[in-house]
Amino acid sequence: MIICQTCEVDPVATLREIIEAARVYESRERLPSPSPSSVPACPRPDADDDVAAAIRDHERYGLAANTDGNRDVEAETPDW
């Protein structure tokens, strides 16, 4: 009530809107979840292929953590 008074809105109308929104929310929650076959595919299906290729060619796409001369010092430095 205080919030409605502060915002200068009708508390009865606001409560009705809240109840209606709750009903809509509940009806959505009761819907069955989509089956995996009805879920849209990844917009870029070749993204997995790119990741797999990078993993296979790990020397070309090597991590700096594996080749950086300071990697041991950085690994031993506390995170504070």
Image: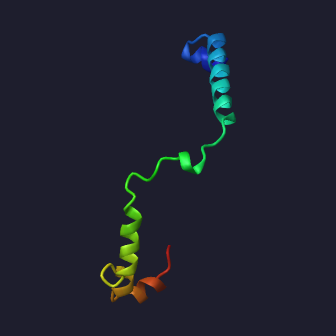
Q: Position of residue 47 (x, y in %)?
A: 38, 62
Residue 33 versus residue 67: which sits nearer the camera? 33
Seen at 39% across and 51% down, the residue is 43
Q: Position of residue 57 (x, y in %)?
A: 34, 81
Question: To which quarter of the image does residue 65 belong?
Answer: bottom left
- Residue at the left extreme, as displayed: 60
Residue 72 versus residue 48: which sits nearer the camera? 48
* Picture layout, residue 7 above or below residue 40: above
Specify whether 37 is left or right of 24: left
Question: To which quarter of the image does residue 29 belong?
Answer: top right
Q: Position of residue 35 (x, y in %)?
A: 60, 47
Specify whether 14 is left or right of 79: right
* Picture layout, residue 72 above or below residue 29: below
The type of colouring in the image is rainbow
Q: Position of residue 69 (x, y in %)?
A: 33, 89
Seen at 66% across and 35% down, the residue is 31
* Picture layout, residue 52 above or below residue 65: above
Seen at 30% across and 82% down, the residue is 60
Question: In which quadrant will I find the N terminus?
Answer: top right
Q: How many marks?
A: 0
